[in-house]
Amino acid sequence: MHRPGDTQPGALGPADAPEAAEALVAHLLDVDANCPACSAPLRGLAAPACPTCRQPLVLSLDDRPPRFGWFLVTVMPGCMTGGVAFILVLVICWFGLQPRPAWPMFATVMTLALTDAILGSWAYAHRARLIWQPPSRQRLLALAAWGAHVLVVVGVNLAAHFL
C-alpha cells in the first residue's frame, strides 16, 4: 500500500490507470488490510479511497528494504534484562540463596524483566509494522522503550532505598 508522502516509481493509482483501481478493489475483497493514513479496515472496499478518511489508495510494490536497526535497539532492553534475570534466578535457585540481603538488586532486576518483557512482547507482536516505520518514528519508539527501562530502574531503586 502507498503511504502518504511517499513517491514510488512504478506505483499505479486511480489517476494513472483504471485497471489499477479495479485491481486494488478486487484485491481488497479477500484481503484484510488497513488504511495507511488512519488504520481503518479496507476489506470489501468499493472504491480506491479510504471510506473513513478519503485518502486515495494506490496499488504499488514496495521494494524498500526493511529497517531492522532501530527495531533491535527497541527490543534490546528486554533481551539484556531477561538474560540477567534468568542468570540471577538460576544462581539463587542453584545455590539456595535467599534474595533478602540483595533485595534491592533482586527487585530491580525482576521488575525490569517484567517491564521489558511486556515492552519486548509488544514490539515483537508488532514487528512487521515496526520495521517498515520511518526511521524517525523508529527512533522515537526506541527512545520510549529505553526511557521506560530507565524509569523503572530509578523508580525501583528509589522505592528500595526508602522502604
Image (tube, rainbow, N blue to C red):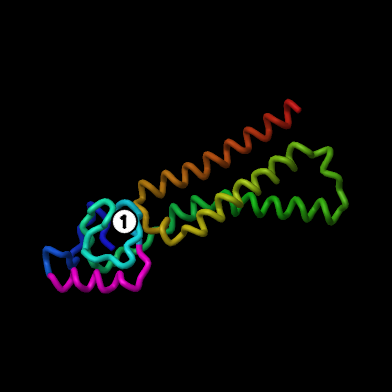
Instruction: State the residue position of label 1.
Output: 36
Q: Amino acid at mark 1?
A: Pro
- List x then y, in percent, for residue 39: 35, 54
Query: Residue, x 15% and y 73% (percent of image)?
Result: 19
Q: Is residue 66 magenta?
A: no
Helix, strand or loop for disc 1: loop
Q: Quadrant of residue 101?
A: top right
Q: Is residue 28 magenta?
A: yes
Q: Which residues are magenta?
A: 18-33
- List x then y, in percent, for residue 56: 21, 57
Query: Residue, x 22% and y 52% (percent of image)?
Result: 5
Query: Residue, x 49% and y 50% (percent of image)?
Result: 74
Residue 142 drawn above or below residue 127 = above
Q: Residues within 10 Å of mark 1 (few under 14, many from 20)?
A: some
Residue 35 drawn above or below residue 140 = below
Residue 71 drawn above or below residue 157 = below
The dominant secondary structure in magenta is: helix
